Amino acid sequence: MAADGSGRVYVLYPHYGEVPDCRNCLVPTMLLVTSADNGKTWQLPRVMLESGSGQFDAQIAVDPTDRRTLYAVWLQSKKREVMLAKSVDAGATWMISVAARSAVELDKPALAVRGQSIYVGFNHEEDVWVAWSQDGGRSFTSNPVNVAKSAGWSLLGGATVDPAGNAYLAWASYSKAGGARGPVELYVAKSADGGKTWTPNRVDVSSAAPGCDTYDCAEAFLGAQISLASDAGGTLYALWSAGSKKLGPQRIYFSASTNGGENWLPRKSVASVDLGVEHAFPAIVAGSTGDVRVAWMDSRKAPYWNTYYRSSSNGGATWSEEIRLSRYVPGFKYIAKTGFRFPFGDYFGMAIDNHGDTHVVWGEGLNYQSPGAIWYASGR
C-alpha cells in the first residue's frame, strides 16, 4: 500500500484467479487498485503488466521527496526477475524494467525510494541481496550486493531510506543447524554510500516459533519477522515479532534509533494483551518527525485472529489506545464475530495520506491454503 500527496491511495496485490479480458495473464497476476479521494471510492483493478509468467510479492511506494512519483516491484519469470515499475502520472501509465535477474528463484523483494535513489532488496540463495539505482530507475547496478552472508537462511522484512540518503534493510536470519526450529537473529543493515557497502547490526534474537499444523501452513510462517520505517527527522523505527521460549508464542516489539541504527532503544511490547498470545506479521509506517504507526495480527481471541493498530506522535515514547481494525462481516465463512480464522498471506501494508490519516490493508482467510480476501480500513 502507498499514498501520495494528492489524496490518491494505491493497493498492489497478486490476484489468484482469472483476470477478465487478459488472455496472457497467468495465476497470479499483479493488479493495482487506486482511490483518488483518500479511500472513499476505488477504481476497478488494473493489470500492471500482461505476462506469460505468474507475478508474486507486491511492493509499492511513493517517493517521499515529491509525494507524487510512484514505484512498484514484484517477482516474475518463475521468480527469477525482480520487475520495477515507475509512474509519474498517478499510475495511469508505467515504465517497466528489470531491476535484478537471477538463474535461481528469488523471494521477498523489499522496496525503498527517496528522490533518484531506489533500492530493491531480495532473497537469493538464502542470503539478502540488493540492487540499486541512483538515476530514478533508468539503470540499475549490474552487480547486486550480498548484504547478509549468513550461515543459514535469511528472510527480508523491510527497507527504508532516511532524509540524509542512508539506506536500510531488515531481515530475519535462521541458522543452518537449527532451521525453523532454531533461534532467529533479527538484523538491520545500513548503507551510507549509495548501496555499495552495508553494515549489519543485530537488533534482537528470537526463539523458534510454534509450528502451525492446525492451519496447514509452511514451517516458520508464524516465525520472527521485522519491518522498518524512518520519519522526516531521520529517526529509524523497527517493529518485529520474537519469542522467548522455543516453539512458544511470538510477541510484537518496537524500538527506535536516532543514530542510523548503530544503537537501539530497549525494545517495548506494543500489544496490550497478556503474555502467551501468538503475534505475527508486524507492519509499520512513519511520517513527520516523531509520527510512527504500527499494526500487527494476534490470536488473543483464539482460535480466531485479528488485526490491531496503535500510533505515536513522540517516536514511540507513548502510544495511542489500541484499536482492533478487523471486524465481523456476514457472508464469509472464515469470519466470526470474534475474528477471522487465519492470516491470508505473509504481507500487509500501511500508508499515511495527505490529510494525516492512516490506511491499512491486510489478508484474511480460512487457513494457509484456502481462498481469502484483502480487507481495508482507514482512520486517524
Image (cartoon, rainbow, N blue to C red):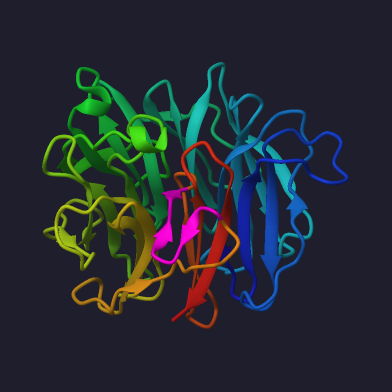
At x 18%, y 74%, the residue is 317
Residue 162 visible in the current orientation:
no
At x 31%, y 44%, the residue is 225
Residue range (magenta): 333-343
Percent coordinates x, y for residue 362 in the rendering: 49, 57
Residue 95 as seen in the image, left or right of residue 365 = right
Instruction: Say if 317 sits above or below 90 in the image.
Output: below
Q: Nearer the viewer, residue 5 or 370?
A: 370
Whether the magenta-drawn stretch holds residue 355 is answered as: no
Residue 158 as seen in the image, left or right of residue 356 = left
The quadrant holding residue 150 is top left
Quadrant in which the C terminus is drawn: bottom left
Residue 312 visible in the current orientation:
yes
Percent coordinates x, y for residue 64 in the rendering: 51, 66
Q: Nearer the viewer, residue 134 or 282?
A: 282
The quadrant holding residue 283 is bottom left
At x 44%, y 49%, the residue is 343
Instruction: Say if 107 sits above or below 242 in the image.
Output: above
Q: Which of 3 and 359 is in front in this view?
A: 359
Percent coordinates x, y for residue 143 in the rendering: 50, 26
Whether the magenta-drawn stretch holds residue 340 is answered as: yes
Quadrant in which the N terminus is drawn: bottom right
